[in-house]
Amino acid sequence: MEAKHPSLVKPTLETLFSIDFEWWRENDHNWQVHLRSALCPEHQERFAEWEDEQAIDWVDPETAEVKPLNAIQHTLMTHCAQQEDFIGEHTPLLEAAFRIFLANGNKPLSVSEISTRLKRPPEMVLRTLTASGKHKGIRLYVG
């Protein structure tokens, strides 16, 4: 069976999404600034002067898959995203979805799963994730 091109797939509530960091690096020159803004106050201070994008090999504890991550991504996923206030009740939906992916190690999630975690209507989540122009690198998962 031939894989469908992501742009030809009509997303549904069960369509999987994830952050495409490679797309983000190539298309948004402020991506590091955005990642830094999601750091907890302790790590915002630690990374204030950080400019190194050198990747480290991170091993997914569930799949044992090795993935390249920079230090800010690693810190976000292993510490900051685990803090109670990482996603607040007033966090905009797109930012909240982005943070959910950071918190779960960027494992693909369906719109329904994101909706459940955010306690927002699934149709609203689907419209937000598929709106053109504003997606914070959240794209259809092509695995």
Image (cartoon, rainbow, N blue to C red):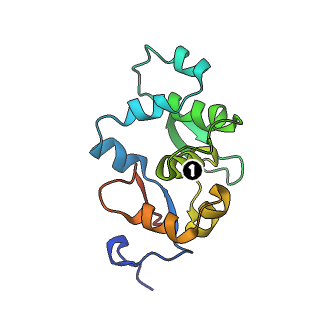
Amino acid type of the residue tagged 1 in the rendering? Phe
Q: Position of residue 45 (x, y in %)?
A: 53, 15
Quadrant in which residue 90 is drawn: top right
Q: In the depicted view, which residue is nearer to us: 51 or 117?
A: 117
Q: Is residue 9 left or right of residue 43?
A: left
Q: In the depicted view, which residue is nearer to us: 90 or 108?
A: 90
Image quarter hosting the N terminus:
bottom left
Is the residue marked by circle 1 packed among few (<14), some (14-19), or many (20+) residues within 10 Å? many
Q: Position of residue 55 (x, y in %)?
A: 47, 32
Residue that mark 1 sits on: 101
Q: Residue at x 35, y 74 (%)?
A: 5
Q: Residue at x 51, y 29 (%)?
A: 72
Q: Secondary structure at mark 1?
A: helix
Query: Is any atom of residue 64 visible in this view?
Result: yes
In the image, residue 79 above or below residue 1: above
Q: Residue at x 56, y 45 (%)?
A: 99
In the image, residue 73 above or below residue 5: above
Q: Position of residue 97 (x, y in %)?
A: 54, 52
Q: In the depicted view, which residue is nearer to us: 55 or 6?
A: 6
Q: Residue at x 71, y 46 (%)?
A: 61
Q: Is residue 64 left or right of residue 110?
A: right
How many discs mark residues in the rendered view?
1
Q: Position of residue 76 (x, y in %)?
A: 58, 34
Instruction: Determine the residue located farthest toward the front in the rendered image.
Output: 90
Quadrant in which residue 111 is drawn: bottom right
Query: Is any atom of residue 55 visible in this view?
Result: no
